[in-house]
Image: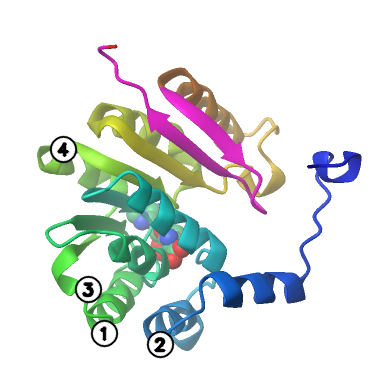
Amino acid sequence: MADQASRGGERYATPQILDYTARTHHPSDHSLERAFGAPARHGMPEIQLGPAEGRLLELLLRLINATKVVEIGTLAGYSALWMARALPPGGHLWTIESDPKHAGVAAEVVGEAGLGDRVTIIRDDARAVLPKLCDSGPFCAVFLDADKGRYDVYGRWATENLRAGGLLIGDNAYLFGRLLDDGEDAKAMRRFHEEMAASYRSVCVPTPDGLAVGVRLDPKA
Ligand SMILES: C[S@@+](CC[C@H](N)C(=O)[O-])C[C@H]1O[C@@H](n2cnc3c(N)ncnc32)[C@H](O)[C@@H]1O
């Protein structure tokens, strides 16, 4: 059920409730702790996903039996670790990171977790990388978590390179509360939503900053 307050956007989560539910459903472990703490240890921005969002990514990838996944925005590899854990042997995650320091820290984190064989960290701007990645597709899922003003461009690439039934997932889909503004990045984010709605069966999950999730419709159907 929902009530008027929660329909209007009020949240009943408290830090204590979030902590309890995270500990109960997906207790952290050494590798995840190391990955989550890596931005703080290395003086990087602490803008990684929360644990529940990471777990949700893992579950979504498991639900579709994902084998080939692309992520834009690696940071220190926290979300990459969650997604790599969902992959079967032989599955692969390509994660793109433009900041060399972030990519270096992520390589350490992924290596320490023993997942280096199924994760490729590509150290470049996503705009340069994506055209070269097409040959490795079609992909099962594309997760966008960087460069929010270009989600429309990245979304179009995903639509061209996902298999039917594949997932397009975009974090910060409320654009930090600026989704309905007049700025160019807000317009681009609205195009992302509207184009996703046209080619996917989709929803924007009301996480703190919105998580857009769409299942690619079969273009031949
Ligand atoms: C929000 S963080 C990613 C967090 C990560 N997905 C996680 O949850 O652990 C965004 C990252 O994207 C990188 N980035 C920004 N613009 C980019 C671009 N155009 N191409 C590739 N990486 C980019 C930033 O350097 C930053 O490390």
In this rendering, position of residue 207 left or right of residue 154: right
Q: Amino acid at mark 1?
A: Glu
Residue at the image point whose x is 45% and y is 34% from the top: 214
Tell me which image quadrant ligand 1 sits in: bottom left
For label 4, the crowd category at 10 Å Cα-Cα, with few meaning under 14, some 14 to 19 and many 20 or more, is some
Which residues lie in the magenta part?
Answer: 200-220
Residue 115: assigned label: 3
Mark 1 / mark 2, whichever is N-terminal: 2
For label 2, the crowd category at 10 Å Cα-Cα, with few meaning under 14, some 14 to 19 and many 20 or more, is few
Distance from disc 2 to disc 3, alpha carbons, whole Å, reads 14 Å
Mark 1, residue position: 112
Q: Amino acid at mark 2?
A: His
Which marked residue is nearer to the observer: mark 2 or mark 4? 2
Distance from disc 2 to disc 4, alpha carbons, whole Å, reads 34 Å
Magenta stretch holds residue 201: yes
Local SS, label 4: helix
Local SS, label 1: helix
Verify CB contact (< 8 Å) between mark 2 and mark 4. Answer: no
Distance from disc 3 to disc 1, alpha carbons, whole Å, reads 8 Å
Mark 2, residue position: 30
Local SS, label 2: helix
Q: x, y percentage for residue 191?
A: 52, 25
Residue at the image point whose x is 22% and y is 40% from the top: 139
Q: x, y percentage for residue 26?
A: 51, 72
Q: Amino acid at mark 4?
A: Cys
* Snapshot quadrant of residue 217: top left
Mark 4, residue position: 134
- Closest to the observer: 146 or 209? 209
Q: Amino acid at mark 3?
A: Leu
Which marked residue is nearer to the observer: mark 3 or mark 4? 3
Mark 3 / mark 4, whichever is N-terminal: 3
Verify CB contact (< 8 Å) between mark 1 and mark 4. Answer: no
